[in-house]
Image (spheres, rainbow, N blue to C red):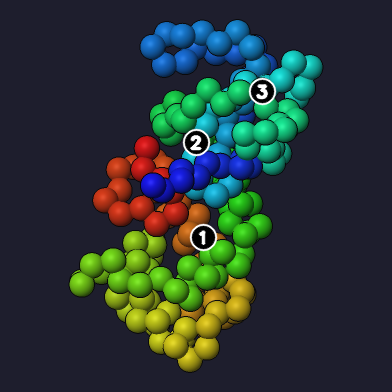
Amino acid sequence: MIKRRYEEAAYVLDFIPEGRVRRRGEFIAEPIVQLVGEEFFTLLEATVKPNMTVQLYERVYIGKEGREKIDRILGRISFDELTATAKGELPAVVEKIVRSQEQRFINFFNTAQPITPKMHAFELLPGIGKKFMWQIVGEREKKPFESFEDFQRRTSIDPVKAVVKRIIEELTTEQKHKIFTRPF
């Protein structure tokens, strides 16, 4: 049996102190926060503990035990359920997460493989077609990438921009293949 993994930390996209109407007309009359998870980029809504406030871009612990600011996780939400503020902040927060986990994403560039006989995982990244895919593969065969700066210097591709765009695509549109997010 596979143990299901959950987000342990998330970043605040919006804080709604007066509560809001959720799906199916349910009204939550307590402070709500909209979050994006740090590991799987899961979009979540949660309630905030009494007398606590959170700031946009703040990293909060949402694991099962010992939450300081988050009371309970209300559940996953879709991109369409985000507030206008949360939608606007999402790209910047995703970029903050990607930059804070540089080694994780450099490992992706060093280890990604074809996903079908005709398509490489790199081709799912916006702006990367066959030409750039072969350039990335060739460069990593010479020597693994060490950092975002090293990757950009050797390929002329901004890896942060490419990864952030792909994550946003996975969160906002239906995608056959997901590299960085979980299916909804």
What residue does disc 2 label? 43
Q: Is residue 81 above or below residue 133?
A: above
Please name the residue shown 62% across and 60% down the image.
Answer: 101
Q: Tell me the amino acid under the disc marked 1.
A: Lys
Camera-nearest label, 3 or 2:
3
| Residue 82 seen in this snapshot | no
Residue 40 or 81: which is nearer the viewer? 40
Q: Is 31 on the left or on the right of 165, as rendered?
A: right
Q: Which amino acid, by three-letter code, is at mark 2?
A: Leu
Horizontal and vertical percent for residue 130?
A: 29, 75
- Cα separation, mark 1 vs mark 2, equals 20 Å
Q: Which residue is mark 3?
A: 71
Q: Is residue 179 left or right of residue 61?
A: left
* Label 1 or label 2, whichever comes before in sequence order: 2
Pointer 1: what residue? 161
Q: Residue at x 44, y 54 (%)?
A: 180
How far apart in space, not on screen, are marks 3 and 1 (Cα)? Answer: 34 Å
Please, is residue 160 above or below residue 15 in the view? below
Give the structural element (helix, strand or loop) at label 3.
Answer: strand
Q: Choose top left, top right, bottom left or bottom right for residue 10.
A: top right
Label 2 SS: strand
In front: label 1 or label 2: 2
43 lies above or below 92:
above
- Residue 74: give x, y in percent of width and height: 53, 23
Q: Residues within 10 Å of mark 2 (few under 14, many from 20)?
A: many
Q: Nearer the viewer, mark 3 or mark 1?
A: 3
Q: Amino acid at mark 3?
A: Asp
* Precedes in sequence: disc 3 or disc 2: 2
Residue 171 x %, y %: 42, 43
- Which badge, 3 or 1, comes first in the chain's sequence? 3
Q: Residue furthest right?
A: 51
